[in-house]
Image (tube, rainbow, N blue to C red):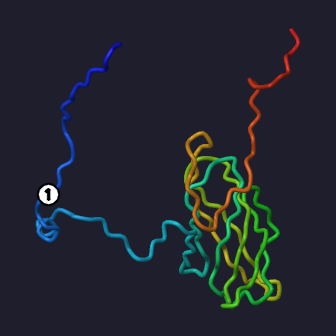
Amino acid sequence: MATAKKTSVNKVGGVRFSEEPAAATAAAGTPSHVHFDEKLHDSVVMVIPEPDGNFTVKVGFLKTQHKYEIVFTLPEVPALGKDVCPTPVPNPHIRITDISHLADGGLRVTCEYMPHQEGVLCEEVVLVSETQEDVCVAVKVHARVMDRQHGTPMLLEGVRCVGVELEYDSEQSDWQGFD
């Protein structure tokens, strides 16, 4: 019967912590800890008012050929009034599916978006007043879009993947051409 032979292995390297207190380390110019602001905006869709009365909406990382539902809240825009709708001009990549008024006077906007290429993309939708002529608000939706083969982005709160458009791959087809 064979017996297992124990061997010892010397470990090389490792982690060494400073013996100095954190205050002394910080005073020397070396950060001793990571500090996060109480209000982190990295996990939610951000709505940024522009000086001209329009809005920029940042929705984070998305993937090409995926369809997303994006929900965001705009602050109250008194000039639009109560009857608000999207412009009838179609955009092939983004469309507003719902607009509802909130108790605090803001607007909850729901839209569907399908990014069509990689890179930093900006799509614009326009809200108009049904009762007041020439009153509109442009909403620019900014997204960082990655190729469908490069990982899965962590979606922000307010963004939800609702579908994937499959690409046709001729190499995977069962159809055999005529010889």
Label 1 secondary element: loop
Q: Nearer the viewer, residue 111 or 23?
A: 23
Which quadrant of the rendered structure holds the C terminus? top right
Q: Residue 23: image x %, image y %?
A: 15, 71
Amino acid beneath label 1:
Ser
Q: Is residue 114 left or right of residue 122?
A: right
Q: What residue is shown at x 67% (from left), y 52% (from top)?
A: 115
Number of disc labels: 1
Residue farthest to the front, as pictured: 1
Left or right of 117 in this view: 126 = right
Dot 1 corresponds to which residue? Answer: 18
The answer to whether residue 126 is left or right of residue 58 is right
**Which residue is farthest top?**
179
Query: Which image quarter: residue 99?
Result: bottom right
Write down the quadrant of residue 147 in the picture.
top right
69 to the left or right of 11: right
- Residue 94 in the image: state x and y as whole percent: 72, 61
Question: Residue sitting at 21 percent across and 47 percent down?
Answer: 15
Q: Quadrant of the N terminus?
A: top left
Within-10-Å neighbours for mark 1: few <14, some 14–19, many 20+: few
